[in-house]
Image: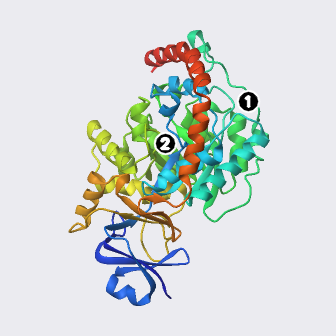
């Protein structure tokens, strides 16, 4: 078999694999055919692409909300989780296809080749179906591999139940969609790089009937949710069991499940997660910005829980998975439970593969999808030194080339898709709504301040 040979100064096959010098990856029909010395593979290649630097496996953002523009561009700054959620109601509605195209194009430019993105709306079934179609269209246009999650809520999104005292200030959500219509959503035609999952956005924002209906309708799809993100979310529905207990009782905690954040799980609850086969997604930048605490990721890994990384559409600029890896190292060190660079690279690759249910990802080995990142970084002497270089010094500015399914989606630091045009359209929409959005934010300020104070007392 012949194919295209991607040649580099070094090829890092996996976080626990090999570092090969003057090596390459031979690809054909979207798959990796062989990995090895250039001298051996060149004879089998019909074309050789000199990628320079280092080739590594594509990374996985295992928890995203697929926002193309940072929320700070909308005037929504980081705040304690519950207050921040209230502020989200001031957001300018943006065209979904462009939003997702920009978000996924930006992810590709930081070496993320697969994303797990949660979709959610309070609109009716027709609008939700259109949201799904537009999101899939945007992801297809960028060239990324995506697991798109249809999320559902039907209660207590902005305040606990019962919402007593000042907690009654946030305006309740009006739901145009019930769970029976939600589970019948038409997500459109299949695509080889797009798969679909579902789940409650969080168990504390869904009733028991909703959890059971999602379980019954899920089939073999992935389940994804937020789990115990802040201390308050554990007792959000007063008098009911904790979210992890309700997920488990509903049959939504298992091998097809991944859960984001998981900051406030006890040791016993972590063992239940391990025994269920579920994966957890660490979102260190979001956890820091929304002031929810630090997840005990070293503990997850010691227990054998599959652990991934999520960017969570947080930050005030373009996403950078290398920054997320470094923040994971930092927060673990502050907790006194340090991680190694190879640990966080594993979370960004094979751990992400586990979280999205595709064990083929995260390694450059024959038969795997040709999801490959070319870094403009120097080759190191050995595997450990190369991982140290990538994690300590890498950035999105070092991502020179990216291939997904063997197709170039980033060339010479630029996304192949028209991300620039989509970004301009998003900026125009934000500019048009500047005054009205500012008015909405001013009206919400007393509520956001009150909830900030309540969250500080109740946490």
Label 2 sits on a secondary structure element that is loop
- Front-most of 424 and 135? 424
Question: Viewer-proximal residue, 95 or 163?
Answer: 95
Task: Give the crowd class for mark 1: few <14, some 14-19, many >=20 residues within 10 Å.
Answer: few
Name the residue tied to disc 2. 312
**Residue 228 drawn above or below residue 15:** above
Quarter holding the C terminus?
top left
* 10 Å crowding of disc 2: few (<14), some (14-19), many (20+): many
Q: Is residue 415 above or below residue 67?
A: below
Residue ID for mark 1: 175
Asked if residue 150 can be seen in this view, the reply is no
Circle 1 sits in a helix, a strand or a loop, which is it?
loop
Residue 31 visible in this rendered orientation of the protein: yes
> What residue is at 27 percent from the left and 45 percent from the top?
338
In space, the residues marked 1 and 2 are separated at their CA atoms by 24 Å
| Residue extending furthest toward the left | 381
Identity of the residue furthest to the top in this view:
165
Q: Quadrant of residue 394?
A: bottom left
Q: Earlier in the sequence, mark 1 or mark 2?
A: 1
**Horizontal relation, residue 399 to residue 100: left or right:** left
Q: Is residue 316 left or right of residue 430?
A: left
Percent across and percent down for residue 244 are: 54, 37
Q: Where in the figure is residue 248, as x and y percent of width and height?
A: 59, 42
The dot on residue 252 is: none
């Amino acid at each position: 078999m012949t194919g295209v040979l991607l040649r580099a100064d070094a090829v890092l096959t996996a976080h626990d694999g090999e570092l090969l010098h003057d090596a390459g990856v031979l690809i054909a029909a979207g798959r990796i055919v062989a990995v090895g010395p250039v001298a051996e593979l060149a004879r089998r290649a019909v074309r050789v692409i000199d990628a320079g630097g280092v080739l590594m496996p594509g990374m996985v953002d295992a928890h995203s909300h697929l926002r193309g523009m940072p929320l700070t561009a909308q005037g929504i700054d980081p705040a304690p989780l519950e207050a921040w959620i209230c502020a989200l109601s001031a957001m300018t509605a943006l065209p979904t296809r462009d939003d997702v195209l920009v978000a996924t194009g930006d992810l590709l430019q930081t070496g993320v080749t697969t994303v797990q993105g949660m979709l959610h709306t309070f609109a009716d079934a027709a609008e939700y179906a259109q949201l799904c179609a537009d999101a899939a269209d945007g992801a297809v246009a960028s060239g990324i591999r995506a697991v798109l999650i249809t999320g559902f809520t039907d209660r207590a999104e902005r305040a606990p139940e019962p919402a007593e005292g000042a907690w009654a200030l946030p305006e309740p959500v009006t739901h145009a969609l019930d769970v029976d219509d939600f589970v019948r959503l038409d997500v459109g035609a299949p695509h080889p790089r797009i798969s679909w999952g579902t789940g409650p956005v969080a168990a504390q924002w869904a009733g028991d009937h909703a959890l059971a209906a999602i379980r019954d309708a899920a089939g073999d799809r992935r389940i994804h949710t937020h789990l115990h993100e802040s201390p308050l979310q554990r007792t959000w529905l007063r008098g009911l069991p904790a979210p992890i207990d309700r997920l488990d009782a509903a049959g939504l905690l298992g091998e097809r499940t991944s859960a984001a954040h998981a900051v406030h799980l006890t040791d016993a609850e972590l063992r239940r997660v391990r025994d269920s086969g579920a994966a957890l997604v660490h979102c260190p930048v979001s956890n820091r910005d929304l002031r929810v605490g630090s997840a005990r990721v070293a503990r997850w890994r010691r227990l054998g829980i599959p652990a991934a990384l999520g960017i969570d559409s947080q930050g005030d600029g373009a996403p950078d998975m290398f920054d997320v890896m470094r923040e994971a190292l930092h927060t673990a060190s502050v907790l006194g439970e340090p991680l190694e660079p190879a640990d966080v690279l594993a979370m960004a690759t094979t751990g992400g593969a586990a979280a999205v249910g595709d064990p083929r990802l995260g390694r450059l080995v024959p038969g795997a999808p040709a999801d490959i990142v070319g870094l403009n970084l120097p080759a190191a002497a050995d595997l450990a030194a190369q991982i140290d270089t990538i994690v300590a010094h890498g950035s999105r500015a070092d991502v020179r080339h990216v291939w997904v399914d063997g197709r170039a989606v980033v060339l010479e630091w630029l996304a192949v898709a028209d991300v620039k045009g989509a970004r301009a359209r998003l900026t125009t929409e934000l500019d048009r709504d500047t005054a009205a959005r500012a008015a909405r934010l001013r009206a919400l300020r007393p509520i956001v301040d009150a909830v900030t104070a309540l969250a500080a007392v109740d946490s």
